[in-house]
Amino acid sequence: MNMTSHRLITQARRVELDSIIVKGGPVLSGTVSTSGAKNAALPVLFSALLADGTHRFTRVPVLRDIDSTHQLLEALGCRLERNGTDVTIEVAPPGEPVAHYDLVRKMRASILCLGPLLTRYGEARVSLPGGCAIGSRPIDLHVETMRKLGAEVEIDQGYVIARAKRLVGERILFEKLTVGGTENALMAAVLARGTTVIENAAKEPEVVDLVHYLRAMGAQIEGEGTSVITIDGVDELHPASHAIVADRIEAGTLLIAGAITGGEVTVDRCVPQHLEALTDKMQDCGFHIETGSDSITVGATDSWTGTDISTSPYPGFPTDLQAQFMALMTQAQGTSVVTEGIFENRFMHVQELVRLGADITPMRQVAVVRGDRGGLSGADVMATDLRASASLVLAGLVAKGETRVNRIYHLDRGYEKLEKKLASLGADIQRVR
């Protein structure tokens, strides 16, 4: 392990001890900018493995998962330079196409190096990944995709081991929507011989962003943003430059932060159409929403009514905003029903919201929220996953007294300096060690 990787790991271990303290009361107002999307940056950075040379990226968020990706790419022979949110990756063939356990155990997205390594070098050995414990997210669809494209794949001693002289284009029909599976299929198919057709493909903006970079490298792809994507394999790709798309989940979280405090907040450098499922529901609650070409403003209001949501793949309501929206509903007039349609274990934040005084009855994948404006009181709470962390911070913004959110390292996996962005809007919030 090189010195850069060692430094990043040491910093990450230090941050695991951090907490965030929020004092409820201030009404947020002002303008705040969205960072680049973590869920877009990760596959785009891994796609650099498809072409030797210098790749340049802008709007790459400063996050723990990005640091983990840097470590893995360096272990695979890449040289990385970072200047703020600008990242340069110099790609060269790795000594061996192996993603070791120590580098991937905390990040689910590490499986995304499987497709690029396999299609580029004819073999890949990737440790089974980790990530948030929000439910079963099996990699069987990734494995079956590589087999469909002609690879021999086995799982041995915790590693996915895949080999193929050259992948061959094929029809891939996903039994269920999978963002990561679609992304791995895209990256594997761009250098395969012949044509690959992905049916029931994920439509998420992050998938579209990956296609934009693959196309910039010379890939032949049509149909991104629809349920059918066609890839005509090419013999080689070349490095290019790319700006990461805005993080719709961060933008949504910041909008909810303004809304839950009854404030007026503008989130800029975002893509409003990527957030229509959220803003439509916020309008149903009584919030005034105004959109610009790259901004969304939530208008100040003293009270709002509850509404029901059910999470589903894009363009439906995002599962990654479910916990934050539930925090908003704890302050609504009336009762709301939250249905989680993606993951079976994504209500772990409920017990922590209840610790703050929320009236929530959870069932298997449904939670009933009885709103009570001003009914939360500060307490020590424990973050259980990335988006749960954000929901607890949001609840702390309106809880009486002081809320301490522990295990905040989850938050740093997906939000770039969230406490500083909230503080810039007037929140009484600080990170402590």
Image (cartoon, grey):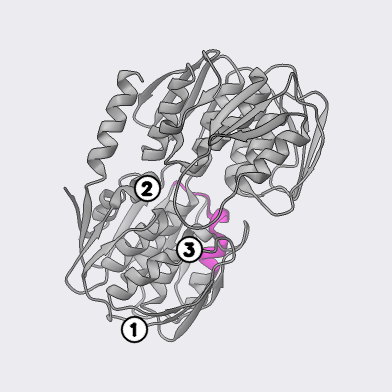
Q: CA distance from mark 3 to mark 1?
A: 23 Å
Q: Quadrant of residue 51?
A: top right
Three-letter amino acid code of the residue under disc 3: Arg
Depth check: give the residue in front, 287 or 22.
Answer: 22
Depth check: give the residue in front, 12 or 377.
Answer: 12
137 is higher (above) or lower (below) than 354:
above
* Residue receiving disc 1: 372
Farthest residue in the bottom direction? 334
273 is higher (above) or lower (below) than 98:
below
Q: Nearer the viewer, mark 2 or mark 3?
A: 3
Is 277 magenta? The answer is: yes
Magenta-drawn segment: 269-280
The crowd level at tag 2 (other Cα within 10 Å; few <14, some 14-19, many 20+) is many
- Mark 1 and mark 2 residues within 8 Å of each other at the beta carbon: no
Q: Quadrant of residue 209?
A: top right
Q: Quadrant of residue 7?
A: top left
